[in-house]
Image (cartoon, rainbow, N blue to C red):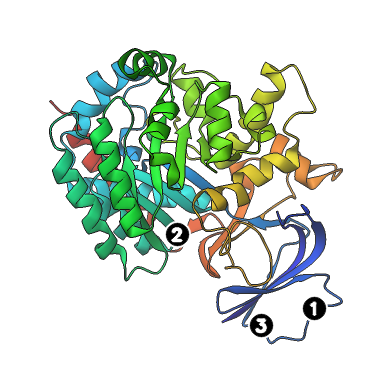
Amino acid sequence: MNICIKNGFIITADSNDTCMEGCVIIENGVITYVGSQESAPETAADRTIDACGGIVMPGFVDTHTHVPMNLLRGYADDMALMDWLQNSIWPAEAKLTGEAVYWGSMLAMAELAAAGVTCFSDMYNFNEQIAKAADDSGLRALIATAVLDADGQGERRLQKAAELFDYVKDFRRVNAAVGPHAEYTVSPEMFVKAADLAAQKGCRIHVHISETRGEHDDCVARHGKTPIGLLHSLGVTDLPVMAAHCVWVSDDDIAVMAEKNMSVLSCPGSNLKLGSGIARVAKMLEAGVNVSCATDGAASNNNLSMMEEMTLISLLQKGVNQEPTLLPAKTAVRIATINGAKALGLDALTGSIEAGKQADIVVIDTSGIRYCPKTNLLHHLVYSGSDADVALTMVGGEIVYENGRITFGDINEIKAKASEYAEKLFSA
Ligand SMILES: [Zn+2]
C-alpha cells in the first residue's frame, strides 16, 4: 500500500530540525520520500491524504505510562505520592484482573492514538494483556514488567518478566523490557537480578528514580547514596537505563546520567500534580543527557496528552530558571518525539520523518483559531496547540485514528467495558 501525504508543513525532527513545505511518500509502511511536491518521484499512491497546509510530524513517543491506570482516572486526586499509592492506588490495584487490565489499556490506546501518540513505553503488571491491547491497536510499544520484592513476590515477578519476552515475540510492534519498580520497593539484590535478566535479553531497564524528595532522603539514609548513586554502584547503569522522573537528582547524579547514557523520562504534569517538584531538565540537557517526556499514568496526570507535557516541559524550565531562552519550541518537539525514540532504543526505526524510517506520523489540522495567524506553525504547536487538532495518526503507515475516530475498535464498547471494570475496583 502506497500513501502520499501532500500539502504539509513537515516538521521532520531530523538532526537539523528541518521543517519544510511538501509531501511525504510512504511505501508499505516505510517513508520513502520527504521533500518538495515538485521533486517528488512519480509513485502511484493507493491513497492521497491532503494535509491542507497542516502540520505533518513524527508521532509522539510517550516514554513512561501505566496504561491500565486509565481505569483509575479521577479515583484518587489531590494526595501525596505515598498516601496516594498506599491508601488508594495499591488497594484498588489488588482487585485488578487480566480482563480489567485489557479494557483499561484499550481505553488508553484510544486516548493515545487520538492524542497523536504512536509509540509508548509502559511499566505495570498483567503485561500480556497490555501487550495484547497494544497489538490490537497497532501502536508501537515497549512493555516492561514491574519487578519489586518489597512484598516478598520478587522471584515470581522476575519469572513473569522473563516470560513476557516469549509472549511478545510474534507481535509486530511490541517489545519487552524489565522494570525494577523503584528504590523503595526493590532490594539491591533484586536490582542486580533484574539487571542480569535485562543483560541476558539484551533489553532496556525501565525504573522510577528520584521522584520525590522523600525517596531521595530515605535512600541516602538507607544506603548512604542517592538512588542513581545506588544503581550506579550496583552496576545497573552499565545497561541502557530509562529513568522515569529524576526530579531530585544531584549534580553528581547528572554527571553519571550523562556518562552512562541514561535516558530521562520526564513527567512534568504528574510531578506537578503529585507535588513532587520540577526536574532540572535544562541542566540535564546542558550536560548532554537524553531527555524525553511522558504522561505517566492517567491516575496521576490525569490525561495522556503529550502535547500538554511538551508545553509544560518547556514553560517550566523557562519559569523556574527565569530564563525564557531555555528549552525553545524546537527542543520541546525533539523531547516529545526523537528523544523518546532514542530512550527506547528505537531511533533507527521511528521518532522522525526521514526516508527509511517507519511511517509513524501525525497530521495536525491548523485551520483552527489557535493557529491563526500562521506566523510559525512549530511554535503554535508547542505554545498554542491542542490534542483536539490531531486529524490523523498512523503507525507503520497504518491509520489508527482519523476524523475523530479510532480505527481499531468501537470506542463506545471500549468506554463501556472500561467503566464496568473500573466500577469493580472502586467497590469495597
Ligand atoms: Zn510511573
Q: Earlier in the sequence, mark 1 or mark 3?
A: 1
Disc 1 to disc 3, how far (Cα)?
12 Å
Query: Nearer the N terminus, badge 2 or badge 3?
Result: 3
Sort mark 3 into few (<14), some (14-19) or many (20+) by Cα contacts within 10 Å: some
According to the image, label 1 marks what residue? 40
- Residue that badge 2 annotates: 139
Q: Which circle marks residue 45 in the picture?
A: 3
- For label 3, the SS is loop
Name the residue at 84% across, 45% down: 374
Q: What type is the residue that disc 1 sits on?
A: Ala
Instruction: Compare residues 128 and 420 and report the one nearer the observer.
Output: 128
Residue 384 makes an appearance in the image: no
* Amino acid type assigned to the residue bearing label 2 in the image: Leu
Residue situated in front as seen by the camera: 85 or 408: 85
Q: Please indicate whether residue 318 sits to the left or right of residue 351 in the image.
A: right
When the figure is inspected, residue 259 is found, relative to residue 47, above or below; the finding is above
